[in-house]
Image (cartoon, grey):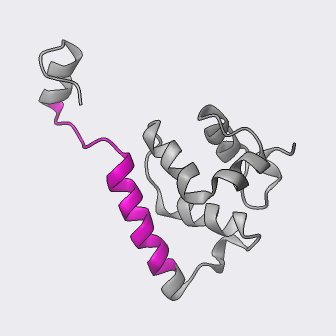
């Protein structure tokens, strides 16, 4: 059972983020796949970042992080944007966030 950081281009920060959402090993990450793993990060509050998303894809394919170019990168951007919309909470206004803390508006 190797650590996530044993995958080239995925370091300790990515390992900590995935471990925090229950993805504990490189094998777990490979089994769940890049999209589902990234969705889990988003659902647990990780801020979306396109570079991190495509680096994850490249790492799981055993490719250098900067190998993603052209049409492939554009296609990943479309998938990233769809994941972001589906798996992140809509931004709350400052007033809504304040009222939510006091239970004055319904939780989403």
* 13 versus 107 height, above or below: below
Query: Is residue 54 one of those drawn in magenta?
Result: no
The image shows residue 99 at horizontal and vertical percentages of 14, 20
Task: Please name whichever residue, 32 or 88, is drawn nearer the observer in this view of the structure.
Answer: 32
In this view, which residue lies farthest toward the bottom?
Answer: 70
Can you say which quadrant of the picture contains the C terminus?
top left
Predominant secondary structure, magenta span: helix
Can you say which quadrant of the picture contains the N terminus?
top right
* 101 versus 68 height, above or below: above
The answer to which image quadrant residue 13 occupies is top right
The answer to which image quadrant residue 10 occupies is bottom right
In this view, which residue lies farthest toward the right?
Answer: 1
The image shows residue 91 at horizontal and vertical percentages of 24, 42
Residue 13 as seen in the image, left or right of residue 41: right
* 30 versus 23 height, above or below: below
Q: Residue at x 67, y 36 (%)?
A: 19
In this view, which residue lies farthest toward the front?
Answer: 31
Q: Residue at x 73, y 44 (%)?
A: 12
* 103 versus 16 height, above or below: above
Q: Residue at x 64, y 51 (%)?
A: 32
Q: Which residues are magenta?
A: 73-94
Q: Residue at x 44, y 40 (%)?
A: 43
The image shows residue 27 at horizontal and vertical percentages of 78, 49
The image shows residue 79 at horizontal and vertical percentages of 43, 67
């Amino acid at each position: 059972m190797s650590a996530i950081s044993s995958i080239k281009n995925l370091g300790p920060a990515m390992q900590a983020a995935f471990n925090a959402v229950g993805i504990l090993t490189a094998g777990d990450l490979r089994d769940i796949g890049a999209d589902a793993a990234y969705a889990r990060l988003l659902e647990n509050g990780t801020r979306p970042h396109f570079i991190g998303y495509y680096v994850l894809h490249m790492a799981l394919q055993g490719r250098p992080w900067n190998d993603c170019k052209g049409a492939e990168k554009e296609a990943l951007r479309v998938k990233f944007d769809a994941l972001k919309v589906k798996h992140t909470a809509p931004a709350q206004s400052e007033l809504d966030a304040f009222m939510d803390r006091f239970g004055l508006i319904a939780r989403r």
